[in-house]
Amino acid sequence: MTNTITSTKDMIRDTALDLFKDRGYDDVTIMDICKKCEITKRTFYYHYESKADLLSGVVKYWGIQAERLLHTFASEEKSINILWQLMKVYCDKAVQYGPNIVKQVYIITIQSSNDVHFPEQMYLFDISVQLLTKAKKSGEIISAADAPEIAFIMYHTLRSITISWASEDGRYDLINEYKKAFDRIVGI
């Protein structure tokens, strides 16, 4: 039963994101989402409190997908390569869904009153610190900063690049900008 609930929730989220991308967040109603998903409003509200609730969980969902990649890259020899692939998930998803959805995600993030401290309480922050620590010990990166400090800088920089990209309506190659910043931060 849990798989059905999870798959329905995922289907609602993915359908809504596609609709937001095509028509814009403000121009999509909950009823539009329900019609496209062939579900009732009751089913929508069983899984999500609102459109904003649906969108507020997107970054965590992307983090979960990045974590799944971690298992795929477990045999990777270089920790820094694994870290890049994890960070790239956020970038890939931002590009996939477009600048309008990214803008809306950040608007909701700013408006929400949750007590999440960025970036230390972000989904993959601890894994990032672990990978950076391993990369420093193995000589993959050389930096005077400790791993938590590098991770802090990396998260803030990548968030800034994403917000700038979204505010400029995706006018530049986000993946390329992410990679340049990532390489500079880790010193490769």
Image (cartoon, rainbow, N blue to C red):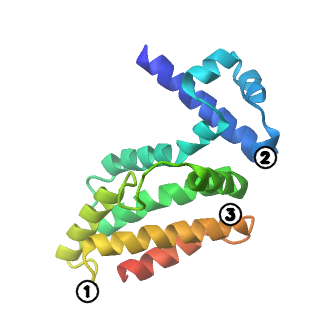
Q: Residues within 10 Å of mark 2 (few under 14, many from 20)?
A: some
Helix, strand or loop status at disc 3: helix
Figure quadrant of the C terminus:
bottom left
Q: Residue at x 57, y 72 (%)?
A: 176
Q: Nearer the viewer, residue 93 or 39?
A: 39
Residue 64 vertical position relative to residue 127 in the rendered view, above or below: above
Q: Residue at x 24, y 62 (%)?
A: 130
Q: Nearer the viewer, residue 94 or 113?
A: 113
Residue 24: image tag: 2
Residue indicated by mark 3: 166
Amino acid found under the numbered disc labelled 2 = Gly
Circle nearer the N terminus (1, 3): 1
Q: Residues within 10 Å of mark 1 (few under 14, many from 20)?
A: few
Is any atom of residue 15 visible in this view? yes
Measuring from the top left, give residue 75's x and y in whole percent.
26, 54
Q: Residue furthest top?
A: 1
Q: Quadrant of residue 170?
A: bottom right
Helix, strand or loop status at disc 2: loop
Circle nearer the N terminus (1, 2): 2
Helix, strand or loop status at disc 1: loop
Amino acid found under the numbered disc labelled 1 = Ala
Q: Residue at x 36, y 78 (%)?
A: 186
Residue indicated by mark 1: 144
Q: Residue furthest front?
A: 113
Q: Residues within 10 Å of mark 3 (few under 14, many from 20)?
A: many
Measuring from the top left, give residue 40's x and y in whole percent.
69, 15
Figure quadrant of the N terminus:
top left
